Image (tube, coloured by chain):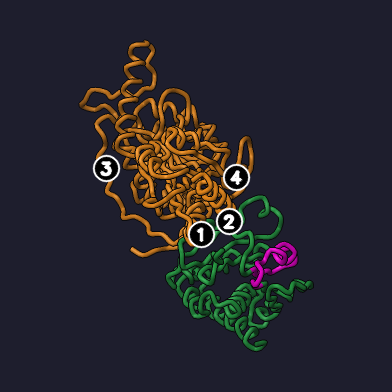
Chain colours: A green, B orange
Amino acid sequence: MNNHNGNDRTEFVFSGFGGQGVMFVGQLLAYAAMDAGFNVTWIPSYGPEMRGGTAHCTTIVSRKPIGSPMSPRPHVAVVLNLPSFTRYEPLVREGGLLVVNSALVSLTSHRQDMRTLDIPATTIAENLGSVRAANMVLLGAALTAQPALPLAAAHSALEAHLPPQHRSLLALNHAALDAGAAVVLERL
Amino acid sequence: MVKELLKGNVAIAEAAVRAGCRAYFGYPITPQTELLEYLSSRMIALGRVFLQAESEVAAINMVYGAACTGARVMTSSSSPGFSLMQEGLSYIAASDLPCVVVDVMRGGPGLGNILPSQGDYFQVTRSAGHGDYHPIVLAPATVQEAIDMTVLAFDLADHYRHLVILALDGLIGQMMEPAELPEWQADPPTPDWAVTGAAHRAPNRITSMHLRADESEAYNQHIQRRLEHIRAAEQRSIEMYTDDAELLVIGFGSAGRIAASAVEMAREDGLNVGLFRPQTLYPFPSDRLAELAEQVGACLVVEMNAGQMLDDVRLAVSGRAPVEFFGRMGGAIPLPEEILDTIEMLCWSLHVVE
């Protein structure tokens, strides 16, 4: 039987509290993938779980047309808070990547069949100027550890698609992407 | 034009604006609310009509009134709200009025849930209201198709003076995908049947009431003749790998696109499997399916319901090939892998029989 996913399709889940920019970071990745010529879908949690305090979204980046936009077993899960860690840590696909905001999540994964990156994203973002950029720190780390897209594509997408009311945060977001990438590169 | 990253509900709303929708009446319900929310500012900014009604019953009757003026009008809802509109839909259909209704289907029956479902196939295709008629029903599987079919829906509605339903599910409504918006359409001229104030002409009369049996039967025959034209001219479908398919997988909307992934996987594994995706649910693309049924060993229908389009497939296939079914219900979304399992089992049994 073939491996039907190969390297031409990567499924990302981003999960955290409302206000942590989970939806936006997933959309930014979708914009980056679209601009780089990939097929892409983005879908938010809108079912009963969205009433429970965590928000999550799924972004699928693929060379081929995308069937289901859902991802029951993501290749990459980026978790910004403890309930998200509890939910997605067991679901990451074998050989996948779990990126944990270790500033807010005290647990760490003991799974040996995937990679885990504990990144104190909220602290890093706070030092850069605002805790709200923690989402970009984690995206920078995720794309460095699992380069489904070059990090430059995320930088370009920020320039092209950050909404006008948030343009003042452009420099902060660029710096946060780079800071997340730097943490991963230092550990290599 | 360039591709933008668009959410299904918002894409349909903007496509309707560009297709010349002059008035929208609706009531919020998940998972279609973004459509109404988007239009609440967009229509006002353009000087067009947006009205959030007090209920779906009111909204559809406002659509009825506005459609009488010959303007392009629309409403949208989701399953329980759509049920509330049924009386009005039947009146609109029986008044020969063009209008577009979007149903973003959710899990049911009952209040159910807000997750994606195709459980209202019977409801939208069989009549969408009481009496002997069918709306034209379009079923997009991507955000791009949702845009294209919104424009098509207005054109078909005007062309046939007929009710057109855009039937999708919460996945297509909530998902963002790269897609291209249509060009702005010029406003069509006001039709000569429109009720616009009868200055300097005889009054036009629009009604759905025919009290005498002979009048009413004649009117019904008129509707049936129109449906015959629609069945002859408007069947639409998409195919993948049908040339040498031994097994034909059939699905519409979200189930169709998920089935497409399963068919791709089966092809990678060397199985001769094809896909048939109806784009019109009414008229159902029976003519092409009947042709394909002659050349395949079996059909597999995949739906997000208990097997509703299955009936139309069986009617079209009409015993030419066995028809099997795989479905998920109540907001559950099929996985490509589980469809592939069924495909493998059916391919295996086809070869065993040989």
Structural distance between the alpha carbons of marks 1 and 2: 9 Å
In magenta stretch: residue A176: no
Q: Which residues are magenta?
A: A77-97
Pick the quarter of the image with the N terminus of chain B. Answer: bottom left
- Can residue B63 be seen in this snapshot? no
Q: Quadrant of residue B21?
A: top left
> Chain for mark 1?
B
Indicate which label's residue lies in the foreground, 3 or 2: 2
For label 1, the SS is: helix
User: Type of residue at label 2?
Assistant: Glu
Structural distance between the alpha carbons of marks 2 and 4: 13 Å
Tag 2 residue: B337
The numbered mark, 4 or 1, whose residue comes first in the sequence reads: 1
User: Type of residue at label 3?
Assistant: Pro
Tag 1 residue: B265
Residue A126 placed where, x, y %? Answer: 67, 79
Tag 4 residue: B328
| Residue at 39%, 51% in the rendered image | B242
For label 3, the SS is: loop
